[in-house]
Image (cartoon, rainbow, N blue to C red):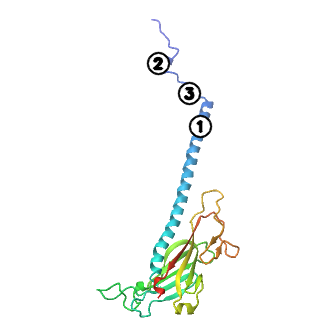
């Protein structure tokens, strides 16, 4: 019987030849280009997200400050019973403390004042603290008991400027006589907040200088604000001390 030899498996299995080295190198190059593009987009979006998160945190700091401080400053010196108990205790460039007769021990009239300021929420103080060598500091708030607690961090500079009844320009250093006579009518607050991390924008520079309510310029040689790539926001607001005008 005659045996038939099959010299080709092409029709049965198809072409079994593999890729050439050149084809593999081209495929690898295309893959690297695609992965590089995807990685670049991912890194860019991650940086933008991180930057927006930092900006949001900075804005939230300022929003919290501007929500709490004006509401409390406006009751400074509140003395509905004319008991001479509501007064400003401390007024410096970085600290403001005051009393306000805003609560009563009477269950039937809890918000009418009782001629005393012995309640925990009737003595309020704000203080900006920044340790030597630190780029930013902390704004702290204190009640009568409990000591100073942090209210906002990443605050680079803060200034309290006081408008007196006979001085429209204001002063950051009212005298003891100004306090004893109740001459302070308003407080201008200047706050320079800084983002926690440097900007992802290459070569980013901030505005350079920042002018406070008193006219002081932060960012000069004598009071520098470093060009370190961090974004900053300056807020200046004036709060009328309604209870000090009588």
Q: Measured along the vertical axis of the image, is residue 83 above or below residue 64?
A: below
Residue 199 lies in quadrant: bottom right
From the top left corner, tell me how far across and down residue 37 is, in percent: 58, 44
Task: Find the distance from the CA under tag 3 to the CA under tag 2.
Answer: 17 Å
Q: How many marks?
A: 3
From the top left corner, tell me how far across and down residue 209 is, in percent: 65, 69
Q: Residue furthest right?
A: 221
**Which element type, helix, strand or loop, lies under badge 1?**
helix
Q: Which residue is mark 2?
A: 12
**Would residue 112 be found to the left or right of residue 128 on screen?**
left
> Circle 2: is it few (<14), some (14-19), or many (20+) Cα within 10 Å?
few
Q: Is residue 212 visible?
A: yes
Circle 3/circle 2 CB separation < 8 Å: no
Q: Which residue is at a point 54% across and 82% down the rendered structure image?
A: 95
Pair 2/1: label in front: 1
**Which element type, helix, strand or loop, lies under badge 2?**
helix
Q: Which residue is at a point 49% across and 76% down the rendered structure image?
A: 150
Looking at marks 3 and 2 on the same chain, the residue that comes earlier in the sequence is marked by: 2
Residue 30: give its label: 1
From the top left corner, tell me how far across and down residue 20 is, in percent: 60, 29
Circle 1/circle 3 CB separation < 8 Å: no
Residue 227 lies in quadrant: bottom right
Task: Find the distance from the CA under tag 1 to the CA under tag 3.
Answer: 19 Å
> Circle 3: is it few (<14), some (14-19), or many (20+) Cα within 10 Å?
few
Q: Quadrant of the N terminus?
A: top left
From the top left corner, tell me how far across and down residue 154 is, in percent: 55, 70
Q: Which residue is mark 3?
A: 18
> Circle 1: is it few (<14), some (14-19), or many (20+) Cα within 10 Å?
few
Q: Which residue is at a point 31% across and 88% down the rendered structure image?
A: 106
């Amino acid at each position: 019987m005659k045996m038939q030899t099959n010299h080709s498996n092409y029709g049965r299995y198809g072409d079994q030849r593999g890729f050439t080295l050149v084809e593999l190198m081209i495929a690898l190059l295309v893959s690297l280009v695609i992965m590089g593009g995807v990685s670049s987009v991912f890194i860019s979006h991650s940086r933008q997200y991180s930057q927006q998160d930092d900006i949001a945190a900075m804005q939230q700091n300022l929003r919290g400050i501007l929500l709490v401080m004006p509401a409390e400053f406006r009751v400074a010196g509140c003395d509905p019973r004319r008991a001479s108990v509501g007064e400003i205790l401390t007024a410096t460039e970085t600290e403001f403390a005051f009393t306000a007769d805003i609560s009563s021990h009477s269950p039937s009239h809890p918000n009418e004042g009782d001629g005393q300021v012995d309640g925990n929420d009737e003595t309020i103080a704000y203080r900006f603290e920044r340790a030597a060598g630190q780029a930013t500091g902390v704004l702290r708030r204190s009640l009568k008991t409990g000591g100073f607690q942090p209210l906002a961090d990443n605050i680079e500079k803060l200034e309290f400027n006081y408008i007196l009844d006979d001085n429209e320009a204001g002063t950051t250093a009212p005298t003891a006589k100004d306090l004893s006579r109740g001459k302070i009518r308003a407080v201008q607050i200047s706050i320079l907040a800084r983002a926690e991390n440097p900007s992802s924008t290459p070569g980013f520079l901030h505005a350079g200088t920042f002018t406070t309510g008193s006219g002081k310029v932060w960012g000069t040689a004598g009071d520098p604000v470093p060009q370190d790539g961090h974004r900053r926001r300056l807020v200046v607001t004036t709060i009328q001390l309604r209870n000090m005008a009588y």
